[in-house]
Image: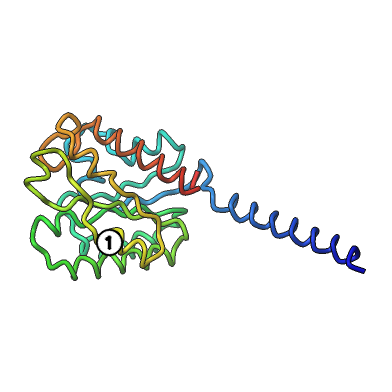
Amino acid sequence: MRRRHIFPAIAALAWLAGCGRRRGQAAILPASASVLALGDSLTAGYGAPDGADWPAQLARLTGWELHNEGVNGDTAEGALARLEPLLAAQRFDAVLVGIGGNDMLRGVPAQSTRTAIAELLRQAKAHTPHVALIATPAPDAMRAAVGVLADAPFYAELAREAQVQLLAGVYAGVLSDAALRSDRIHANAQGYARIAEEIAAQLREAGWR
């Protein structure tokens, strides 16, 4: 009697394993994926020639169609105001959000920034399951002077709460290296290339590629 039950159990396990593999495969973005990059001057590519911004370089690395919606000087509230029309106008397979640096530099209340980014992530997740948050380093003159900038802690908290992919240390690593900067707070072409490479690597590890 026990032997009769072994084979159905094995078949069920095999079926579940197959379903797991199919779910993993479905999560991979195709080379033709349309990806929205929403952010500020670091997304726009300030400090580098045209075509050297990280979304353009990420597109070359992945084959994805990147839509660069970086705006110089933008804040989390500004990005939030822009997001709904963007999502209404076009279907995106993934959304990459990198915002908040100007909020911190201008002394915007931290809770206002957190609330705006949380709503950005909520709207993006309602549009696509592929959402990633790029952490921005906290302004710190002493850390900047010795080249050890660190992500503002609230990015990890927001990513965890929203259950989206956190892209950690990407901007901090580049902006800590004077050779990769065009000025104190922006990358140069080589820096944006490094950002694109790191984003691609982290998304590959997360199973997006």
Amino acid type, residue under disc 1 in the picture: Arg
Residue for point 24% across, 62% down: 154
> How was this image coloured?
rainbow
In the image, 135 versus 92, the foreground residue is 135
**Image location (x, y in percent) of residue 62:** 45, 37
* Vertical comparison of 194 with 101: above or below: above
* Residue identified by numbered label 1: 82
Residue at position x 8%, y 40% from top? Answer: 145
Toward the viewer: 105 or 91? 105
Left or right for 185, reference 70: left
Residue shown at the point (61%, 56%) measured from the top left: 23
Residue 111, x across and y down, in percent = 19, 70
Quarter of the figure with residue 123: bottom left
Q: Position of residue 150 (x, y in %)?
A: 20, 48
Q: Residue furthest right?
A: 1
- 162 is higher (above) or lower (below) than 206: below
Q: Position of residue 80 (x, y in %)?
A: 27, 64
Number of callouts in the render? 1
Front residue of this view, candidates 104 and 205: 205
Nearer to me, 40 or 181 = 181
Residue drawn 8% across and 58% down?
106
Left or right, 44 with respect to 198, comes to left
Quadrant location of the N terminus in the rendered image? bottom right
Query: Crowdedness of circle 1 by 10 Å Cα count: few (<14), some, many (20+)?
Result: some
Mark 1 secondary-structure assignment: helix
| Displayed quadrant of residue 174 | top left
